Amino acid sequence: MKRTTMSLIGVTAALAAATGVAAVAAPGGGAGTAPQSGTRLPVQRSALLCPAPTSSEVAETAYTAFTPPGAAAGADAKKGTARLQPAGTVADSSGNPAGKGGKDAGKGKDAKKGGTAGSGGGQVVPPPDTKPVVPLQEAGKPVTATTDSADAPALAGSADGALAPGWTVQQTTAVSAGAGRGLLGLTCTAPDTQFWFPGVSTDSGRTDYVHLTNPDPTPAVVDLEMRGKDGPLAGGGGGDITVPPHASVPVLLSTLTGSPTADAALHVTVRSGRVGAAVQANDAKAGGDWLPPAADPAGTAVLPGIPADATDVRLVVVATGNADADLKAQLATPTGQITPAGLNTLHVKSGMTTSVDLKDVTKGEAGSLILTPSDGGSAAPVAAALQVVRGKGDNQETAFIPATRPIEARGSVADNRAKGSTLSLVAPEKGEDAKVKVTASAGSGGGTPVSKTYTVKGGTTLAVQPPQPQGLKGSYALTVEPQQGSGPVYASRMLALPQGQVPAFTIQPLPDDRGSVVVPAAGQDLSLLTK
């Protein structure tokens, strides 16, 4: 009798490394969910999605792809691929993307066939170019590409082998005039099945679209729900939106509500399949930017990197569960934590949003906002984001800071320039200093990597001009790695590229890149025995 033995431990390790299912710190909190022991392994495959950047005729978009070096091991250490491919766009029978005069696009039974995309006869419009975008050749060196096309498509792709762990792509668009003028930046997102976007708006002067991109060969079915200060917002149907295979659907949020609403929250739920989601918010007066999804709802939230010269900061919080949330808000400054004026406690009713105008809360010093349950309050889950404005009058510009996850092992951000980058690090726990190594990669056109170690005192924010590679040519990436014994740390990067008198800028959080997974040790090696 011949028997084949397969260790369950080996199967578990292989599945975890391949799928990227990691045991990481709880969003907005400590590492309570991490296993007591185990082996950290690099992921073997990563997926990313970048939405269509803009419809402006006076814009230029830069894509920068990067994978930190040295993450893969064994046979995968020198092999791998990483590239993005253009995706189609769902349009109605008049050629309008969903929500642009054709809010039925992406809906209806025909869309599920991957051909027509709505009862109005919508079609999946093929991308204008099918060549791979920013294909990486090696870890440790960024690759860039640019386009000035007003119909540049959404991108979808994957990385494997040595290029998968920590693969990141930055999409940066400079719009010189018109609606949404300024700098729009986004770290391209991984596909998922649920997203929260506090801070969206359908109010006068705002034009917000949620971009839904499906990376898979089967349709995805998505529900969109808006929440306001009184709960769910009634209006147009946001349910049963079909996103065809390898396609992107932009939905105008004003088609989901019956009346203009500011300081709202958008909940994206995927009932079938998975999508990438990001909101493009354009303000007629204050420019625009991408609003990425907030960290998964939790009892605490950390929003890192409010600029020192912010002229107006607005907080939007949504209580996502069945219980009200009572929160304490603290601003972590360079010297310690303070309570913003008039914000001793913040009460958020279940299923509703609450907003607070913090005005120029930083008063000339960079800071980070930390939300925790108030004394005696329950740890009801919340999602939160900040809308940040720099400049005044006709020279205002807007960016967003969503609550983000802590950096457990490593976080990266691409497309840093010789001028204009500011790295913000916050250690939210008093008495728990954070120690991190920050590495500037080689430049996309040349240069030698440089590393520097920073210590952030517990309860404070440290904003620095990051190190730059020696002999920098082109743009470069930053990698942040907590060191042995470090307390919790959160991070964001501001990229400021002024346009005349407009202080154009964008802010990207640096969550843990989930480039590795912890495979827990088994108490007993069980085996599958087959004849």
Image: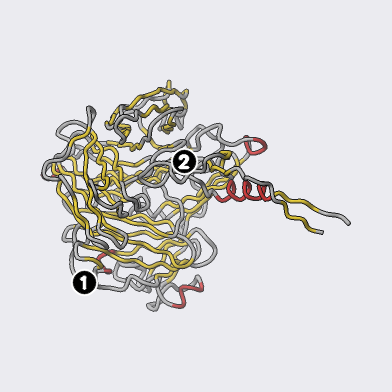
Q: Which corner quadrant holds the C terminus?
A: bottom right
Mark 1 surroundings: few (<14), some (14-19) or many (≥20) residues within 10 A = few
User: What mark, if any, has residue 258 been given in the picture?
Assistant: 1
User: Can you say whether 71 is above or below 517 in the image?
Assistant: above
> Could you say where residue 450 lies in the image, as x and y percent from the top left?
44, 23
Q: Is residue 357 above or below residue 239?
A: above
Quarter of the N terminus within the rendering: bottom right
Residue 448 at x, y percent in the picture: 47, 23
Query: Are circles 1 and 2 on residues that touch, CB within 8 Å?
Result: no
Of residues 57 and 317, the one drawn nearer to the viewer in this rendering: 317
Q: Which residue is mark 2?
A: 65
Q: Is residue 456 left or right of residue 108?
A: left
Colour scheme in use: secondary structure
Which label lies toward us, 1 or 2?
1
Residue nearest the observer in this picture, 105 or 3? 3
Q: Amino acid at mark 2?
A: Ala
Task: Give the structural element (helix, strand or loop) at label 2.
Answer: strand
Give above or below for 292 relative to 468.
below
On the image, the x and y values in percent for residue 416 come to: 37, 34
Whether residue 55 is visible: no
Measure the C-alpha gap from mark 1 to mark 2. 40 Å
Instruction: Determine the residue positioned at 27% across, 55% down.
Output: 198
In the rendered structure, the answer to whether residue 281 lies left or right of residue 490 reads left
Q: Earlier in the sequence, mark 1 or mark 2?
A: 2
Q: Amino acid at mark 1?
A: Gly
Q: Secondary structure at mark 1?
A: loop
Pointer 2 local density, CA inside 10 Å: few below 14, some 14–19, many at least 20 = many
Residue 148 at least partly seen: yes
